Image (cartoon, rainbow, N blue to C red):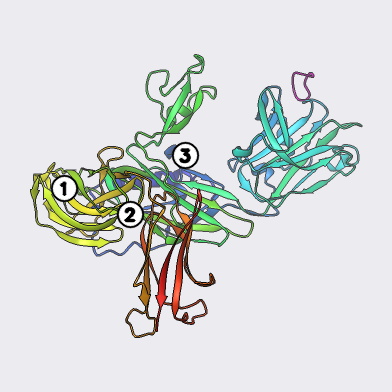
């Protein structure tokens, strides 16, 4: 098992793999896999190139990072603590730091501070006042902070003097505290320690004023912490010393993160769905995210010029800062980094891990990709990830495919004629395409016309589902590049900023990746609502209004259709049936809901499986919103 960056030979192997992927002739389809080194290659009825990457090849020079991660060729997971292993000497090697308070604030430890975590009980740090400063010019006590750089379940702390001084140099008084490292609550914890505007604060776990024991062994709360803090005043009689300050923990890291190296695909590529494999316990979480870009650095770097508060993105020679040149700056010059929002998109919302698969959040061709895996564990629950896998097509169907929708505003619940405009730019080496798919949460009733270059063309509906539709077009290749494709269709919208996402593909190459259509302008594939004056629950309609659940396969169930409007983030809703006395008969659905048109069925049975007596029943839909509870009712009748 490995915890840190690989040795140089692994880095060389990574670069060789990447070079071969870029420099050598390749199939149009390439499948990339990180991890899962012992898994077989995917089986496809088509030729493809396979690129195997290693978890262990993570390299800070390629923007990779493993924080509190246990790296193995076949999987990654949170680093777990062994109860018998003292963490104090390992803090820095595992990505943390050890701080002291000095006249100029909190800073890295001095040379003699190592004596309390050097693993040698025969060396000691003497509390003889050497750390004191003139009153008003520095701290009057000794302080240490062990910052793990991540949150762990730390079980206990132990410290003591050298054995021969056990009776004379024990610590008489001290304060021991912890912090979870959450910046959102900085400044609100119980005990703050600061000097010259350099402040850290902690929750006090132990405050001891009259100690007479040489060996102190102190339990810590059963909650994840990032920092352990100790404050030591002078003894009232004699001096104190600490030979070793030991920290022990158990279980996995409460939070750990793996960030892959930047993956260079060689050319702008159409990116296929991401799939993964692993295991997660019920009380744990694994969050997978991806971001893609057009260059090999997702960050913008800033330098202090020391002209007031001025910052610049350029070095002293006038060249834009890079990771390499930024790391060469003096510490005082380094002013931090920000995401490169021009050439990279942000990390997407985490995929649903249990799904095992999800679409890449891209709306254009991208050459670079990076993945992030975050593990959230408890003392007894954790997980691991075996592999990440995705595919890329080079060349794509088109070098560029720009799209827009018209009109950009429409009334809710009103069938509206929309036109999807597609402007393809197809180079000689591009694959071309003959299918256009449009995905949307709007309810599409029908496709009414397709034009290429302003001329009506024959088309067929290849697919029409609740999530959108796909049309088969005359083949588009370089000879028809820049000829605008127009698709007229009628649909109803339910939510503000309803998106119409397009994809193009070549049906003669079914294993190639669909190419996303790029918005021609920022919001050119989104439709806004003309007004927000309708209720959130648009309608609630049973079909048929009278049904006969007697098992004759005629009107045995009622189909209840409902519309939900304006919902941006999922809300909770409940659809239930009551008799006219207000008694609950059945709950048809309870759970999350979004905008759209939906339908559920009721077979006339109660939760016990018995048929409801004949009569009239009230169907009630309740939606929990940030403006309170909203509801709508309708009647349905059961007859036999």
Question: What kind of secondary structure does the magenta stretch mostly adopt?
Answer: loop
Circle 1 residue: 486
Mark 1 or mark 3, which has the lower sequence index? 3
Tell me the distance, in whole angstroms, between the alpha carbons under discs 2 and 3: 41 Å
- Magenta span covers which residues? 132-139
Callout 3: 10 Å neighbours few (<14), some, many (20+)? some
In the rendered view of the protein, which quadrant contains the C terminus? Answer: bottom left
Residue 480 placement: quadrant? top left
Answer above or below: position of 66 versus 624. above
Circle 3 residue: 60
Answer above or below: position of 309 versus 43. above
Residue 123 numbered mark, or none:
none
Q: Position of residue 192 (x, y in %)?
A: 72, 33
Q: Nearer the viewer, residue 393 or 636?
A: 636
Q: With 610 as the anchor, is 115 left or right in this view?
A: right
Q: Is residue 10 magenta?
A: no
Tell me the distance, in whole angstroms, between the alpha carbons under discs 2 and 1: 20 Å
Q: Secondary structure at mark 2?
A: loop
Circle 2 residue: 441
């Amino acid at each position: 098992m490995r915890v840190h960056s690989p040795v140089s030979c692994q880095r060389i192997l990574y670069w060789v793999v990447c070079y071969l992927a870029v420099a050598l002739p390749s199939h149009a389809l390439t499948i990339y896999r990180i991890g899962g080194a012992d898994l077989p290659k995917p089986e496809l009825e088509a030729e493809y190139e396979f690129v195997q990457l290693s978890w262990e090849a993570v390299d800070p020079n390629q923007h990779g990072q493993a924080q509190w991660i246990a790296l193995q060729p076949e999987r990654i997971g949170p680093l777990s603590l062994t109860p018998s292993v003292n963490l104090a000497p390992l803090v820095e090697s595992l990505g943390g730091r050890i701080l002291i308070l000095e006249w100029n604030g909190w800073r890295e430890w001095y040379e003699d501070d190592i004596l309390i975590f050097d693993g040698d009980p025969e060396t000691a740090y003497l509390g003889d006042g050497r750390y004191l400063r003139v009153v008003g010019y520095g701290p009057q006590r000794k302080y240490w902070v062990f910052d793990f750089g991540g949150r762990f379940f730390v079980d206990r702390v132990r410290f003591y003097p050298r054995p021969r001084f056990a009776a004379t140099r024990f610590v008489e008084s001290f304060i021991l505290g912890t912090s979870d490292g959450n910046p959102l609550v900085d400044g609100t914890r119980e005990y703050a320690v600061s000097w010259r505007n350099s402040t850290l604060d902690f929750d006090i776990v132990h405050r001891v004023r009259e100690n007479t024991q040489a060996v102190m062994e102190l339990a810590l709360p059963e909650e994840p912490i990032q920092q352990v803090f100790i404050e030591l005043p002078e003894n009232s009689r004699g001096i104190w010393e600490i030979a070793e300050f030991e920290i022990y923990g158990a279980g996995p890291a409460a939070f750990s993160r793996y960030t892959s190296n930047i993956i260079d695909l060689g050319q702008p590529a159409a990116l296929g769905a991401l799939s993964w494999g692993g295991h997660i316990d019920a009380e744990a979480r694994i969050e997978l995210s991806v971001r893609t870009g057009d260059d090999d650095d997702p960050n913008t770097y800033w330098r202090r010029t020391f002209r007031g508060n001025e910052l610049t993105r350029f070095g002293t020679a006038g060249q834009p800062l890079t990771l390499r040149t930024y790391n060469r700056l003096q510490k005082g010059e380094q002013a931090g980094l920000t995401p490169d929002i021009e050439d990279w998109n942000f990390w997407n919302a985490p995929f649903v891990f249990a799904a095992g698969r999800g679409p890449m959040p891209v709306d254009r061709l991208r050459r670079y990709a990076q993945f992030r895996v975050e593990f959230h564990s408890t003392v007894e629950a954790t997980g691991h990830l075996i592999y990440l896998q995705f595919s890329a097509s080079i060349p794509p169907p088109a070098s560029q495919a720009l799209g827009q929708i018209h009109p950009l505003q429409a009334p809710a619940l009103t069938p509206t004629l929309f036109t999807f405009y597609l402007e393809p730019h197809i180079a000689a080496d591009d694959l071309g395409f003959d299918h256009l798919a449009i995905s949307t949460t709007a309810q599409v009733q029908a496709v009414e016309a397709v034009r290429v270059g302003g001329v009506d063309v024959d088309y067929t509906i290849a697919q029409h589902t609740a999530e959108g539709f796909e049309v088969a077009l005359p083949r588009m290749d370089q000879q028809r590049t820049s000829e605008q494709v127009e698709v007229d269709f009628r649909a109803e919208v339910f939510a503000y900023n309803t998106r119409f996402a397009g994809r193009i593909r070549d049906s003669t190459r079914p294993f190639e990746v669909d190419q996303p259509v790029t918005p021609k302008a920022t919001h050119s594939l989104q439709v806004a609502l003309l007004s927000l004056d309708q209720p959130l629950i648009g309608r609630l309609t049973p079909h048929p209004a009278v049904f006969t659940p007697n098992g004759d396969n005629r009107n045995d169930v009622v189909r209840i259709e409902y519309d939900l409007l304006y919902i941006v983030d999922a809300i909770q809703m409940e659809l239930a049936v009551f008799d006219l006395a207000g008694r609950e008969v059945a709950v048809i659905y309870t759970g999350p809901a979004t905008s759209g048109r939906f339908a559920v069925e009721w077979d006339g049975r109660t939760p016990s499986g018995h048929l409801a007596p004949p009569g009239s029943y009230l169907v009630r839909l309740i939606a929990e919103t940030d403006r309170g509870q909203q509801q709508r009712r309708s009647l349905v009748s059961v007859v036999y």
